[in-house]
Amino acid sequence: MASQTLIDSNKKARIWNYSKVGVIYLVCIIIGIILVFPYTFMVFKSLMTSDEVINPNVVFFPSNPQWKNYLDIFTADGGAYLKALGNSLIVILFNVIAIPISASIIAYSFAKLKFFGHKIMWVAMMLTMFLPGVATQIPLYVMYAKWGWLDSLLPLTIPNLFGGSAFYIFLIHQFMKGIPQDLLDAAKVEGASAFRIYWSIVLPLCKPVLIYIMVSIFIANWGDFYGPLVYMSSSDAPRTIAYYVYLRAIEGDSASQLAHVRMAAGTFMTIIPAILFGLFQKQLTEGVVMTGLKG
Amino acid sequence: MKFSAKTFVKKNINGWLFNLPLFIGLLVFTAIPMVMSLLYSFYETDGITAIPVGFANYIRIFTLHDSQLPRILLNTIIYTLISIPLNLVLSYLLAVLLNTKVKGLGIFRVVYYLPVIIPGVVAGLLWKDIYDNTYGIFNKILSFFGIAPQTWFSDAKTAMASLLLMNVWGIGGGMILWLSAFKNIPAQLYESAKLDGAGPIRRFLHITIPLSTPMIFFNVITSIIGTLQYNGTLTFAGRAGRGPDDSLYMYGVKIYNEAFVRSNVGYGSALSWVLLIVVGLITLVLFKTSKWVFYGEDS
Amino acid sequence: MKKTNYVVLGLSVFLLSGCIPPPPSSAIDNSEEVSYSVPTSEEIDYNVVDTLSIMIPQGNSNETTMIDSAIVGFNDIYPNVTFEKKYLSHANYESTVRNQFIANTLPDIVWSNSPDFLFLVDKGIALPLNPYINNAIEQGEFDLERDFYTQFLDMGKKGANYYCIPRSQDSVVTFYNRDLIRKVGGDDLLAYIQNGWTWDDFLVVCDAVRKYQNNLNRFDYYAVDMNITGWLSVSYPILRSFGGEILNSEGELVIDSAETRQALNVVHEMVTKGYAVSSGQTSGSSFEVGTSAFLFQSAAVSLFSERAALKGKIDIVSFPRLGPTPKIGAGIAGYTINSKSTRKDLSWAFIQHLISYEGQQQMADGGLVLPSIRKDLTDPETANWLKGWDDFNMDAYLYGSEYKITAEFLSYVDTKYKSGLDLATNDLFNNVSNKDKDVEQSLQKGILLFLEELEQ
């Protein structure tokens, strides 16, 4: 008798579980469709002819997928497109290494090395997060002009040797605060220098937040056309891919004629970060498992 | 103990060295330009020539002598007060949904994050399309359900609501932050709570939320800062980002308008500084009242 | 420690105050001609070795090829001058030029157009050119009235001083789909469309097109594309055609007048009668895809002539004459000289070459298919910009030079009001071309917005 009710309740529990799972899946799928459909719309538009794109009668599916639209982006001025891609990669590579290292060094100084004057520096740093970029843009432009940095990749790279944005430093700092002090004290007792402690213990532990930052840096720099627009607008300046796409698609002789290229460019520019995210999402969402000093 | 310069330096040298990049960067790329822009704000200048005007720019702002300011402030405040809690709650719930121990939810994380990755300029154009009155997708879908077409961005009454709705598509971004915050919550807490007989809702309220407060706090602050400066309407709203009847005209666009379109660099700098002070005050208040934030070093 | 902080702060503020721009020197009074000395022809060294930098708009490949052709011709005169081309994006025209001017990296020769050059004038960026022009006249190198369409040269003037020298003339013309109109009413209907036709003629054809489309149940196909609400070159001339005006020469708002109301009603009528789409709605037809009959544009015919939907089916005609004082929208694109340039004489030599007979012909060869500003380049047999376009009524661009105006009212106030005035005008015409909105109400609302923008 008892075993029968046990089986029944097991069955009930299983049905309850399956329906719970089913409901969750259903909700996720519905939300997914809602959130993603603008993106799919852009992809479809990227395969239409330019007339179809600007046609006031909205067509959802392209009648004749124009894969050559993607080639159109490439055929610009011979190898100019590839050069732009190369320039973007140079900038991104530089920043993706420089920012995590410098930002974490700085975060470390705040989180674990209480030094004289740290309060002032902290406040000063936080203040920069509030400054609208517009306020410093003109003075910066004039400075760069005086140093001859305009029309080069320097304005997009060198300033990032000094920590990148306060946002990243803050993020890493919060993360580092969670690292138990005992772990570091133990290393100090064993005679490790501050730098070694930072490099061999703290930095590896920050991997999740660093990866998040690196992906953010990639996405931010990949799509940044405003920076190049301000600092590198001359013909002899190196172009980045975002800026070049912006130029070709939006400032062409007749914007509406290139509507399909615009959409193709947009799709293309979205694919790379999307792939990156897909590859790294595990690290992005995995937390730090503190096996620390349990034993 | 007598103060010894040598020990003082020795104690602090590491901290100073590690902090040096920040110091240089702050000085050269932030402090100096900031002071320059502060100086600009006391002049009437277009960047080429300048006339000193003392506090005139600031007086103009605070006495609302600039007749565009009242509605700009209203729009900005409404936008901030609604979009931040809205996106916070929705992205949080979304993260909770994806955090349930159901197999195969990983793919949804990527899917929900996709809209966040669309380059800003392209997204603006896309949404302008979607919201088009007669031929946009949204109105077409509504007509399938027999609902009358909406005026979205073309009418002052619906423009702000349309903007807030459009922002909901970006909740994937916040969701990622919450998911990593959740990973930081030790699983044992949930285990022991379960053993104590706590149901899922109780576990949510008493473990998940409290332990994500550091991330919530951080998110609220950065959201406020970003939202008050928001100037995304420049890429899709009509009338140079101002929207019909200035219904989408916000502070960030105002600064851009003054500094770059009208070449009122002095006035634009003054506006920036006022914003900076306001944001600073808000943050200060938030920090002072942040007792509810839980830095879990001990349990 | 605190004290040193203050010292450092004080010192840096002191040092940084050197970064503040100087107060404006007494601005140029443009009611009088500026004069300075220029080299006589004996003093010119044609073999000078130098480099000229020139700023060209980006995204406009035609401009580049045009200038390249002109450079080749220029090198026949000055063989040892090389050129460095720099590009600017027109979207950020003012801030780019201003920033470069501050940083002393602005090229010697800077492209501009009729609305934008006023910014250069007001900021002292462009050099007044009268001494060079007067000298050239004295040397017999050209005669203004004889050689040029002076009303276009005048569009580059502020007050008594020339600043921007046009490299061509832009006029608004009417593009029309001859094929479609013939389908609607045959050659009888087409007969209404001639250079010099009136607005009433235009309305007759619009009416016929409207009825035609209605019979085919194509209620969202219109006779004319409604681009007037975003374009000062069409909206402002319509206003002026009735004697209406936005600002008087003192910069005061004078738009509240009976004449203005007349003009606005004409626009409103176009919408209520269904000739153009009401603002706030999207049209189902467009000239570019061959479904609208008319389009007001100033661009070269080459922009549309090769489109699949339009090939062999379109032509151009002058802008219809409207009201008691008909006006046609026009403008110029041309070049200015950087007031801080160290090669002013050479820069002028290049600009003079651009407007010379040879220069204009070379540029036409290099892609400039717009009307020349020279009076001796109107013969299809000889003028390069006309060659090959015999199928089109290119005279449409040249018709009615006595009617042509730019958005002159913008020059009556400081340039910082320009974008605000542009916005307010577009707003007004946008509201007026909404068939559900009352014209008087739209005007009152518009007046408030104008006043707001002018106070700023």
Image (cartoon, rainbow, N blue to C red):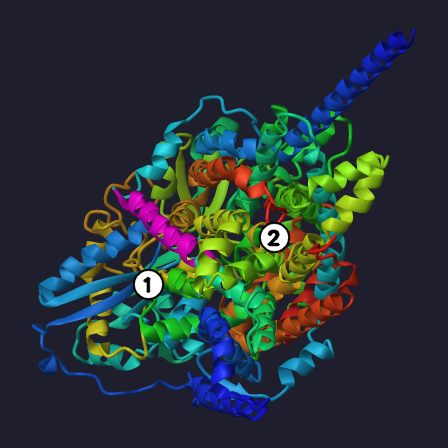
Q: Is residue C290 above or below residue B238?
A: above
What secondary structure predominates along the stretch shown in magenta? helix
- Crowding around mark 1 (Cα neighbors within 10 Å: few <14, some 14 to 19, many 20+) is many
Q: Does C321 appear above or below C165?
A: above
Q: Picture coordinates of residue B90 (x, y %)?
A: 73, 43
Where is residue A51? Give x, y as percent: 47, 32
- Residue behind mark 1: A151
Tell which subunit mark 2 falls on.
Answer: B
Q: Are marks 1 and 2 in contact (CB under 8 Å)?
A: no
Front position in the image: C233 or A216: A216
Q: Amino acid at mark 1?
A: Asp
Which amino acid is tagged 2? Gly
Q: Quadrant of the C terminus of chain C?
A: bottom right
Residue topped by disc 2? B238
- Do the residues at discs 1 and 2 belong to one chain? no
| Label 1, label 2: how far apart the Cα atoms are | 32 Å
> For residue C165, what is the image quadrant?
bottom left
Q: In x, y percent, where is residue C134? A: 25, 80
Q: Nearer the viewer, mark 1 or mark 2?
A: 1
Q: Is residue A206 above or below residue C52?
A: above
User: Dot 2: what SS?
Assistant: helix
Q: Is residue B286 magenta?
A: no
Q: Is residue A86 rendered magenta in the image?
A: yes
Q: Chain of mark 1?
A: A
Would you call the spot at circle 2 few (<14 residues within 10 Å), some (14-19), or many (20 or more)?
Answer: some
- Quarter of the image where the N terminus of chain C is located: bottom right
Q: Which residues are magenta?
A: A79-100
C60 vs A294, nearest the viewer? A294
A178 sits left or right of C232 in the view: right
What kind of element bears circle 1? loop
Res. C171 visible in picture: no
